[in-house]
Image (cartoon, rainbow, N blue to C red):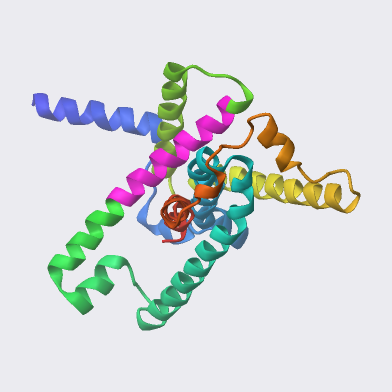
């Protein structure tokens, strides 16, 4: 009897947070329009791209200082090439598995049960890391504008993780409405940043940065010439965070 009361209390609390459960007959109407679906399913990619360049610079700047920016584009080009290979591979998978082609099903059919279980576990770990790293990167970006202490950053990160979980529990359409706006805001903001940068270059408002002057003032590391293959590979691996969203 006590167990029934507990279940009833838990159900009431769940209903208070998430609202009335949907009837099975209404599930077919819980579909997203193309603009909303595009924003929802691309948000993972966007979150990874948002901090990939920063991860590259974190590795290169301590080694070469301001020259690190000259290596960003070549490394990014290699990452884009890998993403193109992934996209081509996924297109082949979609053709072979038009109804359901997740990592578990594809691996099980081709390699067996144990590799499929490993693929499933890897995806679970990847999902957890994607949410945690994306949230931490977002809070770090906020703290670069509004200084926040470490305890406050942790609180903000936990709140954002809770918001993501809560939005997903509300349902497909409701979560789509919640997550579509930030995605399009990010796209517009990034587009405006690129347009502004191109405009500044074309109007010659931006001048070449004098590397020699920075060396004289200690702005560039004295180990500029020590850009080894290891450092470049490490920067490439760190920038590979951009692939996690596509993957």
**Residue at left offset 58%, top offset 61%:** 74
Which region of the structure is painted magenta? 125-143
**Residue at left offset 27%, top offset 32%:** 11
Residue closer to the observer: 52 or 5: 52
Residue 210 percent coordinates (x, y): 76, 41
- Specify the principal SS of the magenta part: helix
- Lateral position of residue 114 relative to residue 177, left or right: left
The residue positioned farthest toward the left in the image shown: 1
* 8 shown above or below 204: above
- Lateral position of residue 234 relative to residue 38, left or right: left
Location of the C terminus by quadrant is bottom left
Res 142 seen here: yes
How many numbered markers are drawn? 0
Location of the N terminus by quadrant is top left
* 153 shown above or below 125: above
* 81 shown above or below 168: below
Res 19 seen here: no
């Amino acid at each position: 009897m006590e167990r029934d009361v507990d279940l009833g209390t838990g159900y009431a609390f769940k209903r208070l947070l998430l609202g009335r459960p949907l009837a099975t007959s209404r599930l077919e109407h819980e579909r997203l329009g193309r603009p909303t679906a595009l924003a929802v399913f691309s948000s993972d990619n966007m979150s990874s791209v948002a901090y990939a360049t920063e991860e590259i610079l974190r590795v290169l700047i301590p080694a070469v200082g301001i020259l690190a920016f000259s290596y960003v584009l070549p490394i990014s080009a290699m990452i884009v090439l890998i993403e193109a290979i992934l996209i081509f591979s996924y297109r082949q998978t979609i053709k072979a598995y038009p109804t359901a082609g997740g990592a578990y099903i594809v691996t099980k059919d081709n390699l067996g049960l144990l590799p499929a279980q490993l693929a499933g576990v890897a995806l679970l770990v990847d999902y957890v890391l994607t949410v945690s790293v994306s949230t931490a990167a977002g809070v770090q970006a906020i703290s670069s504008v509004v200084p926040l202490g470490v305890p406050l950053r942790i609180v903000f990160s936990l709140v954002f993780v809770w918001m993501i979980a809560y939005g997903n529990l509300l349902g497909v359409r409701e979560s789509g409405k919640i997550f579509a706006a930030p995605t399009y805001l990010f796209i517009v903001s990034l587009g405006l940043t690129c347009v502004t940068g191109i405009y500044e270059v074309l109007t010659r408002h931006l001048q070449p940065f004098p590397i020699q002057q920075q060396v004289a003032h200690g702005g560039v590391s004295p180990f500029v010439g020590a850009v080894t293959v290891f450092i470049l590979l490490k920067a490439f691996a760190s920038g590979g965070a951009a692939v996690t969203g596509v993957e």
